[in-house]
Amino acid sequence: MPFDLTNRLVVGLASSALFDLSESDEVFRSQGEQAYRKYQHENQDKPLKRGVAFPFIRRLLSLNALAPNDPPVEVILLSRNDPDTGLRVMNSIEYYGLPITRAVFLQGTSPHLYIPAFDIELFLSANPADVNQAVMAGYPAGQILEGNIKDENSDKQLRIAFDFDGVIVDDEAESVYQGSHDLKDFHGHEVSRVDIPHNPGPLKKFLERISNIQKLEMEKQDTDASYVPVLRVSIVTARNAPSHKRVINTMRHWGIMANEAFFMGGVEKSKVLEILKPHMFFDDQRNHLEPSSSRLPSVHVPFGVTNKDLSVIKNRKLEE
């Protein structure tokens, strides 16, 4: 019987997101493919350094302890390497003890075409072209931004923070603001639709899967009072009152609960993020990510009207 991924949280992961590939990439750029191949052969048993997404992925996979016989999380490597040069990546995964067993090696081909084959709810890569292609094709994807990220082994909690518009929901409301740059128009639009749930954005299904795992954690707490939940979900949005109501009503309609919400009203998000210290923060606007991305794991989701110069995706329809 085939292994069923449809009821699991599936993350597709480029090796550039999980590991620091700067040294090997420099060999490829400066010396060419044959030198790169030789370099990877000679270093195939030397573990790669941890990358920006490593702390996030390690904690995400730890959630499989909730149901070892039916693990809720699956991470699949989607690599531009060929199988031969990709061996170092798989050896590094084994060295760090990450339970990642499924991999796709594509020798320079963009992996986005294979996202639906594995029911992937989130594709992460440091390669902006691969991410843009995925988003243009209607798939949930984000670019990992470069940063010097520390992984505190003693910190077991997994903190995930999301912007709202253009990430969890589509860019309907954002388009109103970008059209006039008038907050009164934006708030008026949202107040008039306060009880109408937003259309889903690129990471709605991902958040939905995360919410399902949170429910598993609550069930675990009911039977084991000593259990401490791992997941903590936060919304960090530039919205403020009165447009906050539609955010809450949309989340209620979907049956998704956030642990925290920050309605910033234009205050710099990095001020909150520095205290919150998420293991991943997703936003559709680079200017909201760059102030803290060098220290906090950050993902740019190139979706919607604020990214129209990156891709033509206005007419894309996301399925519920």
Image: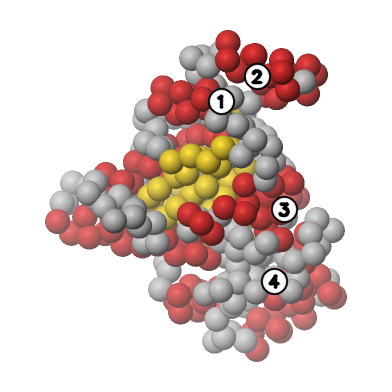
What is the three-letter code of the residue carrying label 3?
Answer: Asn
Q: Quadrant of residue 31?
A: top right
Earlier residue among tags 3 and 1: 1
Gap between marks 1 and 4, in whole Å?
A: 37 Å
Judging by the rendered image, the residue that carries numbered circle 3 is 132
Circles 1, 2 touching at the beta carbon (< 8 Å): yes
Judging by the rendered image, the residue that carries numbered circle 2 is 37
Q: Secondary structure at mark 2?
A: helix
Q: Quadrant of residue 208?
A: bottom left
Total marks shown come to 4
Gap between marks 4 and 2, in whole Å?
A: 39 Å
Q: Secondary structure at mark 4?
A: loop
Disc number at residue 84? 1
Residue 240 visible somewhere in the drawing:
no
Gap between marks 1 and 2, in whole Å?
A: 8 Å
Circles 4, 3 touching at the beta carbon (< 8 Å): no
Q: Nearer the viewer, mark 3 or mark 1?
A: 1
Circles 4, 2 touching at the beta carbon (< 8 Å): no
Disc number at residue 316? 4
* Image coords of residue 252 (percent x, y): 44, 76
Q: Eyeballing the image, is 3 above or below 316?
A: above
Q: Secondary structure at mark 3?
A: helix
Q: Nearer the viewer, mark 1 or mark 4?
A: 1
What is the three-letter code of the residue carrying label 1?
Answer: Asp
Q: Nearer the viewer, mark 4 or mark 2?
A: 2
How many residues crowd mark 4 within 10 Å: few (<14), some (14–19), many (20+)? Answer: some
Instruction: Say which residue appears at 71% left-offset and 15% top-offset.
Output: 35
* Image coords of residue 53 (percent x, y): 54, 38
How many residues crowd mark 1 within 10 Å: few (<14), some (14–19), many (20+)? Answer: few
